[in-house]
């Protein structure tokens, strides 16, 4: 019964509540595009607040577990049982040793002082400073091997253009699980110096 309740809450969250945004009714982190070449962009992101959780396991299982933990937080698993709007994308980064960080960006209406404290001690709330990133967008249902190959190609592309990759890769997923593959937006990104 607990799983059913969470599934219904997740469906309600993905359905959206009329948020101002750039992707299917969901707020996205603000960025400006510095340059574009095909599906690859160099972007400048402003500061933002994130909720994140570290999960042990393979990539696919880790993002599913991390998503459920973070969804519990935004759907009321916090001090005051506040509902926090879903944003996109869901980010995932390899920390090594089979540990993955899964991250939700918090809506821009929150500050560090107004964001409710999670009930789940596994969740960390933290500010991210402004950052430059190189990112590649693509559609489909990528598996771990496809993501790794895209990351390696993007890192090489960045280096060939004199860009210093300093962190990543970060995998980003913008759409609900039932979205048709050709309608999905996925990204691979790296932090730049």
Image: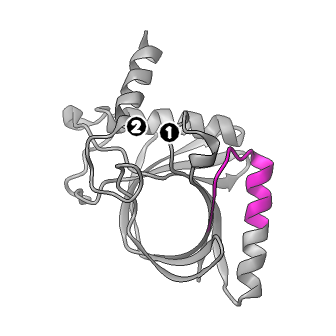
In the displayed structure, 170 sits above or below 176; it is below
Which percent across, then down, holds residue 104? Answer: 44, 50
Name the image quarter holding the N terminus.
top left
Image marks 2 and 1: residues in contact by CB distance under 8 Å: yes
* Extreme residue toward the top, this view: 1
In the image, is residue 1 part of the stretch drawn in magenta? no
Give residue 171's position: percent from left, percent from top: 62, 55
What residue is drawn where x is 75% and y is 78%?
A: 157
Query: Pointer 2: residues within 10 angstroms few (<14), some, or many (20+)?
Result: some
Front residue of 145 and 191: 145
Residue displayed at 67% across by 38% down: 60
Q: Secondary structure at mark 1?
A: loop
Range covered by the magenta-colored residues: 136-152
Relative vertical location of residue 21 with respect to residue 70 in this rendering, above or below: below
Q: Does residue 121 show up? A: no
Looking at the image, which residue sits at the far bottom? 162
Q: Residue at label 1? A: 176
Q: Which mark is residue 14?
A: 2
């Amino acid at each position: 019964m607990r799983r059913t309740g969470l599934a219904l809450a997740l469906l309600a969250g993905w359905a959206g509540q009329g948020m101002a945004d750039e992707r299917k009714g969901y707020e996205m982190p603000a960025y400006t595009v510095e340059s574009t070449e095909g599906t690859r962009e160099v972007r400048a992101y402003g500061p933002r607040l994130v909720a994140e959780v570290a999960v042990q396991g393979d990539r696919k299982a880790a993002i599913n577990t991390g998503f459920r933990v973070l969804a519990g937080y935004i759907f009321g698993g916090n001090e005051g049982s506040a509902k926090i709007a879903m944003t996109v994308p869901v980010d995932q980064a390899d920390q090594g040793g089979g540990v993955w960080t899964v991250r939700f960006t918090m809506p821009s209406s929150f500050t560090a002082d107004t964001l409710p404290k999670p009930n789940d001690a596994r969740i960390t709330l933290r500010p991210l400073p402004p950052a430059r990133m190189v990112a590649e967008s693509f559609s489909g249902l990528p598996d771990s091997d496809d993501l790794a190959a895209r990351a390696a190609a993007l890192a090489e592309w960045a280096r060939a253009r004199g860009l210093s990759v300093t962190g990543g890769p970060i995998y980003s997923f913008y759409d609900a699980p039932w979205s048709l593959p050709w309608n999905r937006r996925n990204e691979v990104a790296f932090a730049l110096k």
